[in-house]
Amino acid sequence: MTILGCGAALPLPGRNPTAQVVNVHEKQFLLDCGEGTQIALRHARVRMMRIDHIAISHLHGDHYLGLPGLISTFNLLGRTRALHVYGPPKLQEVLALHQEVGEGRLDFPLHFHPTQTEKRAVLFEDKSVVLESFPVRHRIPTTGFLLREKPKEPGVKREWVRDHDLVPSEILALKRGEDVVRPNGEAIPFSKACHPVPDARSYAFAADTKYWTAVAEFVQGVDVLYHEATFDDGMKARAEKTYHTTASQAAKVARDAGVGQLVIGHVSARYDSPSLHLDQARAIFPNVVAASDGQVIPVQAHL
């Protein structure tokens, strides 16, 4: 996961509004697209034309205003491959209006998929990954996003294929996790004949949201959780009023969800650094890092 922007509503030098790109087996998923996302993509050396899926959490400007420009750039660069955009239903109207007033025409298919905020939903799925949305609680309808890697099929060791003259039906059985017992009694154990299968990984993105205990249920057990922590604990009343979260509240979600690592971001521009937020969060959930623009965070299985 590459942080393209970790700031709150007010952009600052070195702290763009929210955007990040998650690479799953070279599939690029862009989560939110605040102002400056195109420049951040170039600084991060992300191949932007490989982005086929863009998920927008809600329609506050610091989370989507970079999207019309990015779509325009895709067109200028000669994109022909389809782009899938997931977001609130009114986002489709916004994008259509940009095309209408600018008398533009896209030379690639743009498929819009409306999200809803009352229950979890699968937005995209293929043989290697699932993209889901889940509800959060903000001033306007907002979703979080969850990417789950599908378990890989075990690979049979070449030397076992060679030394035991494994036939296709036996190889398929081993790939299903089954031991093979031949008519002559010879056993081909799955545990020895196959390479260990790495654990499937997961990543959750909780955009603007007030502290809501249900979020912990939606992101239960994920390996890495990005959760907003706009305010320090001394501004709990302000966080409640504006439907945002404090550092300790974000840590409570991570603790209750049993996640592997917490990344806090969306820190208010009133703070020069997130050091206070880190101290407060680590008092509740030790494995916390603060997001910074350009930061690359590997998603590693923790269970």
Image (cartoon, rainbow, N blue to C red):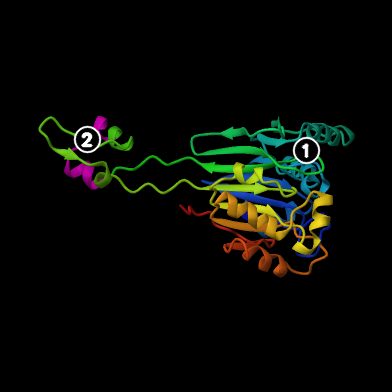
**Residue at 79% across / 64% down in the picture?**
234
Give the prevailing secondary structure in the magenta stretch. helix
Residue 52, located in which quarter of the rendered image? top right
Q: Which residue is mark 2?
A: 180
Residue 264, located in which quarter of the rendered image? bottom right
- Under circle 1, the secondary element is loop
The magenta segment is 158-171
Say above or below: 243 vs 113.
below
Q: Amino acid at mark 1?
A: Pro
Residue 85, located in which quarter of the rendered image? top right
Can residue 265 be seen in this snapshot? yes
- Under circle 2, the secondary element is strand
User: Looking at the image, how many numbered discs can be counted on the residues?
Assistant: 2
> Is 115 on the left or on the right of 179, as rendered?
right
Q: Is tag 2's residue or tag 1's residue first in the polypeptide sequence?
A: 1
> Is 188 on the left or on the right of 219, as rendered?
left
Which numbered mark, 2 or 1, is in the foreground of this view? 1
Q: Amino acid at mark 2?
A: Val
Asked whether 281 falls inside the magenta stretch, the response is: no
Q: Nearer the viewer, residue 136 or 115?
A: 136
For disc 2, the neighbor class at 10 Å (few under 14, some 14 to 19, many from 20) is many
